[in-house]
Amino acid sequence: MLRHRFVCAFALLVALSARADVVDIDNAELARLAAAGVPVIDIRTEGEWKESGIIPGSRLLTFVDERGRTDAAAWLAKVQAVAKPEQPVIVICRSGNRTRAASQLLAQQAGYQKVYNVKDGIRSWAGDGRPLVAAPTALVTCAAGSRC
């Protein structure tokens, strides 16, 4: 009985230590991590990319489309082309709301070990006067559901 409890406690400890980590970050940390090579995944819609621009070098992978629909499996496949679960990723949207769900999906269901959630989104980034560039036309014009 004591051995069984020890094995259960050890298994729980291992599971908790292997648990993925979602970390809320601010603009300064976003800039630092992006400069260090951590990929930035912009989950906004095409219209939002066009409206405000994007962070230079970010990957444009819409999570929730204009109609409020998601295709988690397709989105995860696109994220895995950018970074594997053992690699850290940064997730950004307009205000930080959609990234909570996307970050949790990456951490809890896809096994990403370190997910950085930009808590105030691109609005805060732009409000701080940080660099933005126009979204690449080739990516913006891709049809929904197609690989670009």
Image (spheres, helix red, strand yellow):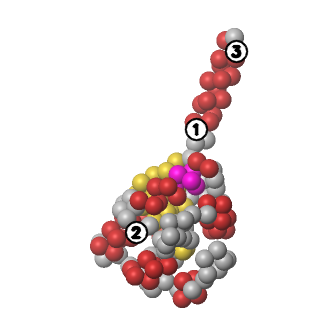
CA gap between label 3 and label 2 equals: 51 Å
Q: Is mark 1 on a helix, strand or loop?
A: helix
Give me the C-alpha separation between circle 3 and circle 1: 21 Å
Q: What residue type is labelled 3?
A: Arg
Give the residue at x 70% y 17%: 4
Name the amino acid type tagged 2: Arg
**Residue 143 or 34: which is nearer the viewer?**
143
Res. 114 in view: no
Q: Is residue 85 magenta?
A: no
Q: Say whether residue 140 is left or right of residue 49.
A: right
Q: Is the magenta stretch mostly helix, strand or loop?
A: helix
Please rate how many residues cluster around mark 2, counting C-alpha atoms within 10 Å: few if below 14, some from 14 to 19, many from 20: many
The residue lying toward the viewer, choosing from 68 and 139, is 68
Instruction: Locate residue 56, reporting x and y percent.
Output: 47, 78
Residue 8 percent coordinates (x, y): 66, 23
* Residue 41 x/y as whole percent: 53, 68
Q: Earlier in the sequence, mark 3 or mark 1?
A: 3
At 66% from the left and 29% from the top, the residue drawn is 11
Position of the N terminus by quadrant: top right
The residues colored magenta run 103-107
Which type of secondary structure does the marked residue at label 3 adopt? Answer: helix
Mark carried by residue 56: none
Residue tagged 2: 94
Q: Residue 3 carries which label?
A: 3
Q: Mark 1 points at which residue?
A: 17
Residue displayed at 53% across by 51% down: 104
